Image (spheres, coloured by chain):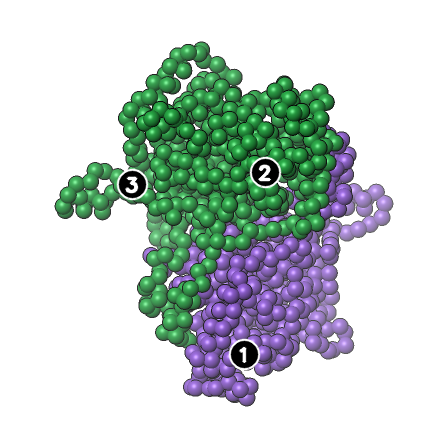
Chain colours: A purple, B green
Amino acid sequence: MADGTATRGRRGGGGAARRAERTSTKVDQAGTITRNIPNYEVLDEAALTIIETNADIVLEEIGVAFPENEAALELWRAAGAEIRGDRVHIPKGLARELCKTAPESFTQVARNPARNVTIGGRDLVLAPVYGPPFVRDAEGRRYATMADFEKFVKLGHMSKWLHHSGGTVCEPTDVAVNKRHYDMLLAHMTLTDKPFMGSVTEPSRAQDSVEMCDILFDDGDGTGLNGRTAMISLININSPLTFDSIMMGALEVYARANQACIISPFIVGGAMAPVSVMGTLTQVMAEVMAGVAYSQLVKPGAPAVFGAFVTSIDMNSGAPTFGTPEAAQITYGAGQLARRLNLPFRSAGSFNGSKLPDAQAAYETANSLNAGLLAGVNFMLHSCGWLEGGLVADFEKFVMDADQLGILHKMAKGIAVDPESQAMDALREVGPGGHFLGCAHTQANFKTAFWKSDLLDYKPFETWADEGSRDTRALAAARVDKLLGDYVEPVLDPAKRAALLEYVAQKKASMPDAFM
Amino acid sequence: MADGTATRGRRGGGGAARRAERTSTKVDQAGTITRNIPNYEVLDEAALTIIETNADIVLEEIGVAFPENEAALELWRAAGAEIRGDRVHIPKGLARELCKTAPESFTQVARNPARNVTIGGRDLVLAPVYGPPFVRDAEGRRYATMADFEKFVKLGHMSKWLHHSGGTVCEPTDVAVNKRHYDMLLAHMTLTDKPFMGSVTEPSRAQDSVEMCDILFDDGDGTGLNGRTAMISLININSPLTFDSIMMGALEVYARANQACIISPFIVGGAMAPVSVMGTLTQVMAEVMAGVAYSQLVKPGAPAVFGAFVTSIDMNSGAPTFGTPEAAQITYGAGQLARRLNLPFRSAGSFNGSKLPDAQAAYETANSLNAGLLAGVNFMLHSCGWLEGGLVADFEKFVMDADQLGILHKMAKGIAVDPESQAMDALREVGPGGHFLGCAHTQANFKTAFWKSDLLDYKPFETWADEGSRDTRALAAARVDKLLGDYVEPVLDPAKRAALLEYVAQKKASMPDAFM
């Protein structure tokens, strides 16, 4: 477990320094999660084989579409697929075979090496919400701005349990569409030292992302990234079975630069996939295999992740629904399929359909977070801050969810079984009718025995009432203010900062603003 | 699946009847839950063996206390235990051996046979909150009354996913302590036809409970219960390792009458048990084995349940905490231990420490409900309505939680793998770039494909805002009113009702009010 801490304020010698340290705010970081617990598996061997067989039938007989992408069709043809129009028919077994060159796990580097993450294996990496055009706070709901984006990056930096700064934490709608990726990347590169995601909205913006990483990660010899994976980016599949040329263009840029791509079907069940769990899993399997296989055609060995963003639908209103049993079943099943492909797995998150960070939001979020942990998710995008079906990034919910992520950290450790944990001395010391509060075993272990929320209320009713009868949202609003108040920007080499600013200024000056 | 329905209003013939039926409210009941999914197991064979070995050491070397209960000590002595003072030292293996006569599962009958439940095996029975002295609704928090109690029983009757009416859903503090059990039992017997729990606060009140069941369940031949199990009752252990003589007196009454007892350690970890998970599980195992063994000494074959009410503690304030990772770990582990004893398992519930039915309440509740499902819980007391560490039964949270219980029903069914569920026809029909909303498979399956909340909000933002921007609690308050407005008392034989009222009137007249 990496356990880096930064302290607020400058260090000095003697008593003043010690006083300063006592009053300074530590940015505690909990380190990585490596599961020491079993995965939960709902599908038996027969069901898994049915899905794999059916996915192969889908790829061969129905095929997948790569519209407006002649180069992709040519790569597929050369690999042995049959091309009809823009439809790629992949012979049984070929996609699976091509997936084998993708790594089972990989390291994503951060500019602070203590924040490097492993994606795959038994690790779980937690990243914040991605994509909402709106934000909400105690004042209400409004279009997101770059100022909101920076606040979220700072909150992510300060969040003990969060490993990753994410990508489009919210859409900065006050910046031109063709320029916002520069500002977003600058924020991730300067306001935090956690790892982050690249732009996917145009292949050229993916290229910009790589070039900015070449500046940030250069070791002083001008070789830039030099093969290291410094970004993981979200490549959504246009489900069902369609691989958009813009997304594929971004994938091509990233794969060639050895940057990681999450190949992610984007499915509201019943609309973009069949209404059944088995049918959806079959489609997910087919889509991910085709996407990962394509990344390996572009560059064998490029890191790729088995993604599954799947919700169900309210058949009355057509609205997507979250935290549902079907979503959990698909998450568990997709995890099994990903492991059989030896690929890292992305799924689950702080999903909910509520308009407010209320009980609905929390039930639905907790259902998804719990399923994600036990399903063996390796990269959990949207792990905090999601609201209103992903339309809104909510400041209070961000810190509420980020606090709950501590539970995943603790659960993943499993149960210690050593003699000290067996506590037979305590049982003997206390005996029938006694209490354990003061016994030696409790004194020795109480500080680390129980996970503790940094947010939720455990006070006696009277104290709570005297303090204003605050609900979770009010407590969270105070925590947002506290974390932003305590925020200190991590040190960055001034020359690199200047070079990044210069790169962005030149790029921005070279193009007119575009708003779509 | 039993799927009984009752309709509001009287049935007649012709068009008027059809109109009445269209406008009447059905009391949908979802039927029982039999899991078709695996249990989640966190402990390996080595850890389980350590716990079982250590629990035997606790029983033999430390022993368990049966204070002020000479008859119990005599039973234990005769069974081969060593008695020192009020301490029972149970030789290794004896408690486990005695537990073997307890049934692996049993049927608890309800006065409506369609509401009978199986407790044990792969079944999960859901019962409401138990014990709070306070209630809360939109108006605030106050001492509970009998009127509140009756409202909760009606809400439980109307709750589709709830199998059981529970016991002390709240404490009716406006009724004398020595008489409230009569009113509570009358409410469970008359206002619902779901199964319920017996009184445990005095052995005489357990006896009253049995006698009232003899009236309610008599088949007209005067033999009363005639050996059927019609109640399950909560026998808390005074942890650590102490078996209170009043609770044991109630257990003795129930065991002799073949009524079921939940033998339940009541543990705030760090106070009533060691601060470690392994230590707590060891104590739980020892306590449950001693309690169940004792029930079998009283009457071999009496139904008994392995209970585990376990929370962690906030070591700063001493407050119990809920929905924590340690509580989940203990729930998973205790489930494994219960199955190795071939006993039904009671644990988990809508536990939380929040003062309001807000996000904290929902996160913590969802964490516990999810763990309870996967841990293999057979009887989930407190499955809805719990607030503020069990001090409060909350009306809004009751219906919020009761709605979430639908997720457990759906999850437990597992994933259908038949050809229709594989949906290959749908995948072929729709193909790349299409959508599934109108395809034949969706039309045939959409009504049952996805679990649907009867409470939560899925509406578009604008509709939601127009309707008053209601949070979950406000939606729940409206649902409480709706369910109570739709409530219809299930039919009860007037002679039985009269006999029950007569029994209670005579009993009440025979004793002065007592308020402790």
Q: Mark yes or no: residue B442 visible.
A: yes
State the CA–CA distance, disc 2 to disc 3.
Answer: 41 Å
Q: Earlier in the sequence, mark 2 or mark 3?
A: 3
Q: Where is residue A253 in the image (x, y as percent from the top left)?
A: 59, 78
- Mark 1 — residue? A93
Q: Label 3 is placed on what type of residue?
A: Ala
Q: Residue at x 59, y 60 (%)?
A: A377
* Labels 2, 3: front one: 2
Chain to which the residue tagged by mark 2 belongs: B
| Marks 1 and 2 on same chain | no
Q: Residues within 10 Å of mark 2 (few under 14, many from 20)?
A: some
Element class at badge 3: loop
Q: Label 2 is placed on what type of residue?
A: Lys
Q: Position of residue B218 (x, y in %)?
A: 36, 28
Along the viewing direction, whichever of A332 and B261 lies nearer the viewer: B261
Chain to which the residue tagged by mark 3 belongs: B
